[in-house]
Image: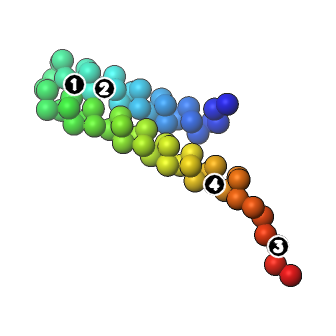
Amino acid sequence: MFAKIDYYFLCASFLSFVASVGLWFLVNHDYGAYVGLWVPSILILWVGIRLVLLARLTAPTTRRN
């Protein structure tokens, strides 16, 4: 169900979330909020890449004569 590239995006977003929580509680609220914005950005990029790959797989193949 998941491709190898999917695990990279999921791990990156999870690590960004963990770093955000750590920064929020241990360093500074502003740093944690900034890194927390990376999580939806990474997931949206993942969805965009998946849509492009899906469009390429389902596109009809045309042959030129």
Q: Earlier in the sequence, mark 1 or mark 4?
A: 1
Pointers 1 and 2 in contact (CB under 8 A)?
yes
Disc 2 residue type? Ala
**48 relative to 28, above or below:** below
Q: Earlier in the sequence, mark 2 or mark 4?
A: 2
Question: Which quarter of the image is occupied by the C terminus?
Answer: bottom right
Disc 4 on helix, strand or loop? Answer: helix
Q: Earlier in the sequence, mark 3 or mark 4?
A: 4
Residue displayed at 71% across by 53% down: 58
Residue carrying label 4:
55
**16 relative to 50, above or below:** above
Which of the pair 16/45 is nearer the observer? 45
**Image quadrant where residue 39 sits:** top left
> Tag on residue 63?
3
Disc 1 residue type? Leu
> Tag on residue 1?
none
Disc 3 on helix, strand or loop? Answer: loop
Pinpoint residue 11: horizontal percent, then vertical percent. Answer: 48, 29
Pointers 3 and 2 in contact (CB under 8 A)?
no
Disc 3 residue type? Arg
Q: Earlier in the sequence, mark 1 or mark 3?
A: 1
Pinpoint residue 45: horizontal percent, then vertical percent. Answer: 44, 46
Residue carrying label 2:
19
